[in-house]
Image (tube, rainbow, N blue to C red):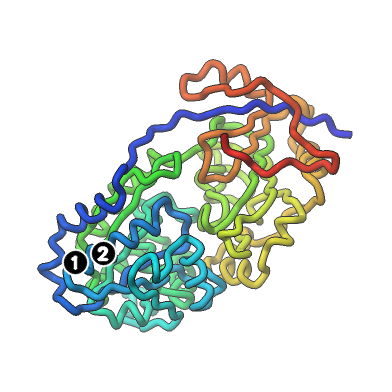
Amino acid sequence: MCELPKLFRLRQKFDDPHVDDVPGEVHRQLARLELGTKVKPGQSVAVTAGSRGIANIAEITRAIVEHLKRLGANPFVVPAMGSHGGGTAEGQRRVLESYGITEQFLGCPIRSAMETVVVGRAAEGFPLHFDRLAFEADHVLVCNRVKPHSDFAGEIESGLMKMLMIGLGKREGANVYHRAAEDLGFERVVRAVADEVLPRCRLLAGVAIVENAYDRTALIEAVAAERFLEREKELLKLARRLMPRLPFEKVDILLIDRIGKDISGVGLDPNVVGRKFNDHQALEDEFPKVKRIAVRGLTPGSHGNAIGMGIAEFCLGRLLAQADPAATRLNGLTSGRIASIMTPLDYPTDREMLAAALGTIGLTEPPEAKLLWIADTLHLAEAECSAAYLEEARGRNDLEVLSAPRDLPLDAAGNLPDWQRR
């Protein structure tokens, strides 16, 4: 039987700027833009809500709705999530409801449909799709978290512009934009959309959210539509600096308790695991460098979408049982991330999975392996680390050792408990 490494608990110390009064900050930010000079009483405003597990997203969305109501507008929320939610109107509504974004909580309608309007063509020739319900509104207000994208690198990655493109493009638009990005690059597609969609679709404003490494709201900022490109570049720099990270740069085995769409666009964040440009190996100048990834399960909030499992080499059989093949394939085909929906090697127990993975890391004996066990790639304040890291951890001011090394808590069947936060 394979001898497994001993683990100790560790806490990371990250910067923690955060917003204490989330609804109040939303109102203060929107008030800066003096939207009452543009929005007339009785006019409709489509407010976007996406498929990511953003901290305080229900409260932020409700505060946007309340602010618009104070102006005399008639706001409604549209799901803006490309092909997610199984690519159906009802599926996308259910995703929002799972985050607490309901009509009762918001105090306004949620209108979900998959139909789009082609509002024009980019100079490069591809059609520009926009959610029909949003297009028919008098105004559109976009809300999203700004953060590094799971696929693309550039001055603009995931944020207001992505919501405008992929989110409000619905299934058809998301498919077209991802295909165009394969040929032209993401930034060129962003520019094309900005040139054509921004002036044609009555964009009122955006609410940009930046989170810190503790999955807390670090910043909320209302951005005028004409400043989307300029301001998003600056906010991305902040988001990149504040994002969570693994505590060490070299990892033999990364054991992840759960992946899911509410964690990252591809289930696990490639920016965190060092596989943004190659699903199974970090580039020479990319860190961390993780040899093998093993995944234990899928979040309920992913609604069966197991995209990202293909970035892992190993998984528990329960991950495959939790996956909805149709939803997973639809997202993979739409986004173009085919490898990320392929099936890892699966095992019935954690002991068997870890033994197999440890046999593939080279000459390092299993007890000396550098193993990290994390909840997911969004929550990294604490981690279980193998004894091989202990000396380094004790010598770093940004890390706090919480326990002595001890055996993995495997039960009689050879399985670990689900991750528990302290």
Tag shown at residue 70 = 1
Quadrant where the C terminus is found in the figure: top right
- State the residue in front, 191 or 31: 31
Between marks 1 and 2, how big is the CA–CA gap? 6 Å
- State the residue in front, 100 or 158: 100
Left or right, residue 369 beside residue 129: right
Residue type, numbered disc 1: Arg
Q: Secondary structure at mark 2?
A: helix
Q: Position of residue 31 (x, y in %)?
A: 16, 57
Q: Position of residue 274 (x, y in %)?
A: 55, 43
Q: Position of residue 66 (x, y in %)?
A: 26, 64
Q: Residue at x 54, y 48 (%)?
A: 270
Tag shown at residue 315 = none
- Direction front: furthest residue: 104
Left or right, residue 116 beside residue 194: right
Quadrant where the N terminus is found in the figure: top right
**Where is 380 relative to 364, above or below?**
below
Q: Do residues under tags 1 and 2 come within 8 Å of each other at their CB atoms?
A: yes
| Whether residue 363 is visible | no
| Whether residue 86 is visible | yes
Instruction: Please identify the quarter of the rendering in which residue 202 is found.
Output: bottom left
Q: Position of residue 165 (x, y in %)?
A: 38, 68
Instruction: Please identify the quarter of the rendering in which residue 356 is found.
Output: top right
Q: Which residue matches tag 2?
A: 66
Q: Residue at x 51, y 24 (%)?
A: 399
Q: Residue at x 46, y 70 (%)?
A: 82
Left or right, residue 378 beside residue 355: left
- State the residue in front, 111 or 52: 111
Q: Residue at x 43, y 68 (%)?
A: 102
Q: Secondary structure at mark 1?
A: helix
- State the residue in front, 220 or 332: 220
